[in-house]
Amino acid sequence: MSELRWNPLIRDWTIIAPKRQDRPEIYKGGCPFCPGSGRVPEEYDIYFFENDFASLSLTSAVLSESEKKPYRLRNAYGKCEVILYSSEHSKSLSQLTVEHVKRLVDLWAERFDALKSDENLKYIYIFENRGEMVGATISHPHGQIYAYSYIPKRIELEIDSSEKYFKENNSCLFCEMLENEIKNEKRIIVENDDFAAFVPFFSEYPYEVFIVSKKHILSLEGFNSDEKYNLARILKDVTGTFDSLFDSKFPYMMCVHQAPVNSGSLGQNYHFHVEFYSPVRSERSQKFNAAGETGAWAHVNPTLPEEKAVDLRQAYIRYTANRHEYKTK
């Protein structure tokens, strides 16, 4: 049984999940996500199921708490799901059609709506770990959804900053960030009618990229069909750009940030966006977090965001030169 243990020093929960230790490091003898494995349907387009090695569980009592001050201990209530992008093992997000990625975005929205119906769940986090460098144990194209009974610290900080910025400026922090980036242009990678992708001014990693909605929308459920199509389109563009950067499968962590659920008005000044992080420093080197980053949260980026934006724009040009033209909606 997993547990939530409270860290009073940074006021955040740690999930203690011993079951995760038993998961296979690298699957041998066949992929469990491919048709014929017995784990998934013989034919599927996209597919979701509960994680076999979940760190959260709906069978845990959400309110049980013990331990003496300053410690707190709770059962790790929540849900972990796996989302398979395609039945084809060698495909990646950028190699799928925009229509196919749109169906994936639709599934994300459906799962968001289904999971938020449990009032004990407070945050629904959609993400992908791609590549062995970031700890992915299965190369089949897939992502995950974690539904937490609390709001994770990073999201909490972003929401708090958004709320404070709105009170001080009567405007959305993310809207102003995006307006600045579009006017500035030098960190923009690609944009369409509804989204823009850029290397943030404050990047912690060399190839960090944000995708931000041009409209002030809180979560996936706020997008119409055309906007979901353009989200699919820019997800394909960004991941294709990454793969074109060094002509190889680029390792990344994709993190979908949106407003919390079942939390009253909290997060009304937040803004839907997707954050991409990668440990890649250059074609032949990896960025490791040292004592400053890990122990003090004092991040050091050894590269200029503006220079890396140039690299990514050039990679985007190479990617678009080789892709098929988008189909009409």
Image (cartoon, rainbow, N blue to C red):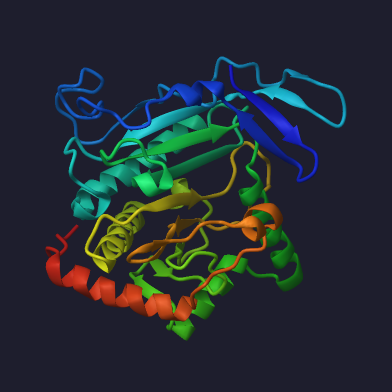
* Residue 221 vertical placement versus 302 (above, below): above
Quarter of the figure that contains the N terminus: top right
Quarter of the figure that contains the C terminus: bottom left
* Residue 105 vertical placement versus 192 (above, below): above
Tell me residue 108's x, y (percent).
Answer: 38, 41
Outermost right residue: 69
For this view, does 313 lie left or right of residue 37? Answer: right
Q: Residue at x 49, y 26 (%)?
A: 20
Tell me residue 303's x, y (percent).
Answer: 49, 75
- The residue lying toward the viewer, choosing from 17 and 61, is 17
Whether residue 269 is visible: no
- The residue lying toward the viewer, choosing from 224 and 190, is 190
- The residue lying toward the viewer, choosing from 138 and 26, is 26
Whether residue 104 is visible: yes
Tell me residue 275's x, y (percent).
Answer: 47, 57
Q: Residue at x 56, y 14 (%)?
A: 59
Total marks shown come to 0
- The residue lying toward the viewer, choosing from 175 and 27, is 27
Tell me residue 257's x, y (percent).
Answer: 52, 51
Q: Residue at x 31, y 36 (%)?
A: 138
For this view, does 242 lie left or right of residue 265? Answer: left
